[in-house]
Amino acid sequence: MENRAHALVAGIFVILLSIAVGLVATWFSGDNIQRVSYLVVTKESVSGLNPQSSVHYRGVLIGKVEDIEFDPEDSQQILVQISVNENVNLQNTVYAQLGYQGVTGLAYIQLNDDGIGTGKLPSHARIPMRRSLFDEVTVSGQHLLTNVNKLVLKMNHLLSDDNQTHIAQILQNIDKATKNFEGIASHLQPVLESFTELTTESGFLVKRLDQLLGEINMAMNKANQKEGIFDSLAESAQELAVTIPELRKLSNNIARNSNNFDRVLQQLEENPQSLIFGRPSTQPGPGEEGFVPPKGIQQ
């Protein structure tokens, strides 16, 4: 009986000790901390992320991933349920990104915000996920590889046999044009020298014009003086005003005499003997005494 009593006591002690150890372990594991649930929403891949993965806010561990599933209302969307310590104050502008631990490829949730939030994020709210730096590099790398592939295809087309022939012809034409340009440059050299001489002569001409303008200014100053050129011009103008009418009369007389002389010459051409016998008498006209009508005209 005593052995059974000792065994029963020992069994009860072991059970109580196990319960105490379990309670202590639960206490130190932090399970007694109150948590708030949120849903991280994304349409990107979440490879490397698993339940129990850690959740960080600005680099500080604040929770863990509880579950990962597809959105029943949108099959293209993934819902990641996370639990966060209750004492963490998340703003309503918070967003999530995937972070990766070293070379293991294991992912975790990294929460950040833009610092412009206007209130606390309510529990069970949805948090949008943005592309991480790694995702951006991956997408950019894919675009870069696509562009490089297109560039290689275009280079292959550019360096085809036909295009190589055309490029060779273009290079030959460029070489010919270069040689022709050298000849043109040699022809242009005298022109440039002439232009230099012309520039020098233009400088001399400008200086001469300056001197001429100075002389004109001096002449104008003299003209403004008393008994100057303008006074002489005024006197000459008065003399011309008197002389011009006389010249006009003389010109009219010369014109009349010239007309008379023309008539005399015409008469001499028609009747040269008048120069010896004198001017013939004028024949009487119709109605005058002695008028004789021409033959063939009846009276």
Image (tube, helix red, strand yellow):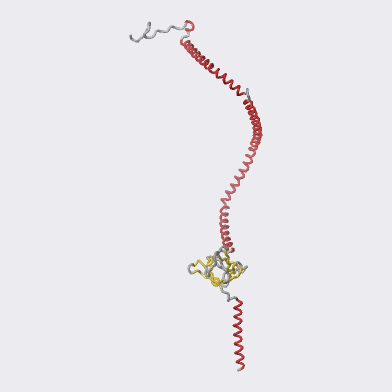
Q: Position of residue 230 (x, y in %)?
A: 60, 24
Q: Quadrant of the C terminus?
A: top left
| Relative height, residue 30 to residue 253 (above, below) | below
Q: Quadrant of the N terminus?
A: bottom right
Q: For this rendering, which residue is in front, 261 or 139?
A: 261
The residue sitting at 48% across, 68% down in the picture is 73
Q: Position of residue 119 (x, y in %)?
A: 54, 66
Q: Position of residue 243 (x, y in %)?
A: 55, 17
**Residue 21 location, quadrant:** bottom right
Q: Position of residue 258 (x, y in %)?
A: 50, 14
Instruction: Judge left or right: residue 153 versus residue 203.
Output: left
Q: Is residue 64 visible to the viewer in this orientation of the structure?
A: no
Q: For this rendering, which residue is in front, 231 or 63?
A: 231
| Relative height, residue 288 to residue 66 (above, below) | above
Q: Is residue 139 visible to the viewer in this orientation of the structure?
A: yes
**Residue 116 location, quadrant:** bottom right
Q: For this rendering, which residue is in front, 62 or 298?
A: 62
The residue sitting at 62% across, 41% down in the picture is 181
**Residue 91 location, quadrant:** bottom right
